[in-house]
Amino acid sequence: MVLAPPRPEANMPKVRVNLYSDTQTRPTPAMKAAMMAAETGDEQGGLDPTVNELCDRMAALMGKEAAVFLPSGTMCNQIALLVHCQRGDAILAHRTAHILTSEGGGTAALSGAQIMPLEGKGGQFTPDTLRAAIYTPSRNAPPLRLVAVEQTANLGGGTVWDSQVLAEIAGIAHENGMGTHMDGARLLNATVQAGIAPDVMCQGYDSVWLDFTKGLGAPLGAVLCGTADFIDRAWRWKQRMGGAMRQAGICAAACLHALDHHVDRLAEDHANAARLAGHLAQLPGLLVQPPETNLVFIDTKGTGRQAADLARALRHQGVMISTMGPTTLRACTHLDVDTAGIDEAAALFAGVLQAQAA
């Protein structure tokens, strides 16, 4: 779970390299221009042409019948679970899944469903693990209603699920009367890394969403996709949860700009993550997990320092990085960090460690 960004301390230097999260990205000048030029209308009434265009494009991109524009990815997840599940139903998901670790207990509070955690390396469970978790229906056990996966697996290190494994998992779920949901917060990072089209990657999933506020760099918004009936029911929950908007085309225009200009460049973030990992792996005491996408996980145990201490020292040098545990840091590359920024951050990291050893 990523903690909230630390509040600036007195005399804290300006952030020079922000590796805290790809949610820290800011709209580019071109994206701002697209937002200001957007045609708008009442989104709640289906009258915003820019929102409608975004939803149509997203449904086609994901190979689904329909889509709905929502303020955040967490709302996408929670609304999807509310549509799929009733109170007391069971959801099978990895133990590090965002719906379990990072949404404020939303599943328990809103849908009343029970998440049954599955084990697996890199934030992923195997088809065999899923099969082993499926039990014979009983009045003593919660009904197995949904299987959820997260692509990429954030707390697993930004790992990419293999598309064939995803298809097998979806097949097992459907054969056993369960629905399927894909948390696609960083789905396009996965498709770019794997060289697979989004509709192929999520083909077996009844619902899927994409977050525009991470590597795609928009200031707001995510889009949930599914069947026309699913999205119609999702709209009722959107209304209930205060997610209906007015002239939301200003925000949808940023998402459309991102689809047009920021997808292919995700490969640059992956290359920068690999570059950063290579630099940090050479520093004494650090154990660095080789990244698959734009997330770099760093074990600080060998330095003898807690991750929070190192994060604080780095922040005093102008580098923001997130703390994931007592001895775990996470660096996240995105469009606001170029190669020069990666090299600068690595040099400052080295300086912090050298100052400790002195």
Image: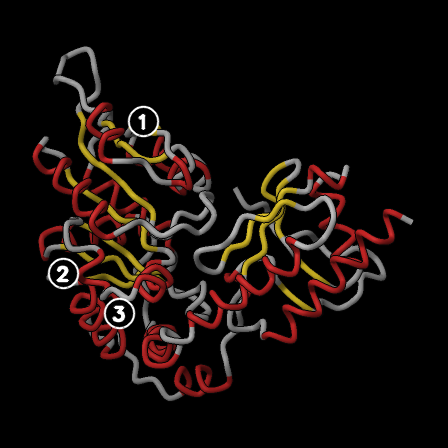
On screen, 230 above or below 294? above
Q: Nearer the viewer, mark 2 or mark 3?
A: 2
Q: Give the residue pinned by disc 2.
A: 64
Dot 1 or dot 3, earlier in sequence: 3
Residue 129 position by quadrant: top left
Q: In the rendering, at what x and y percent does residue 77 appear?
A: 32, 47
Dot 1 or dot 2, earlier in sequence: 2
Amino acid type, residue under disc 3 in the picture: Glu
- The residue most toward the right is 358
Q: Residue at x 42, y 37 (%)?
A: 96
Q: Is residue 233 left or right of residue 124?
A: left
Amino acid type, residue under disc 1 in the picture: Met
Q: Is residue 267 left or right of residue 320?
A: left
- The residue most toward the top is 140
Q: Give the residue pinned by disc 1.
A: 116
Label 1: how many residues lie within 10 Å, few (<14), some (14-19) or many (20+)? some
Callout 2: helix, strand or loop?
loop
Q: Residue at x 34, y 84 (%)?
A: 38
Q: Nearer the viewer, mark 1 or mark 3?
A: 1
Q: In the rendering, at what x and y percent does residue 193 appear?
A: 36, 63
Amino acid type, residue under disc 2 in the picture: Lys
Q: Residue at x 18, y 62 (%)?
A: 199
Mark 2 to mark 3: distance in Å?
A: 21 Å
On screen, 96 above or below 31? above
Mark 1 to mark 2: distance in Å?
A: 27 Å
- The residue most toward the front is 282
On screen, 90 above or below 233? above
Q: Give the residue pinned by disc 3.
A: 43
Q: Is residue 101 left or right of residue 42?
A: right
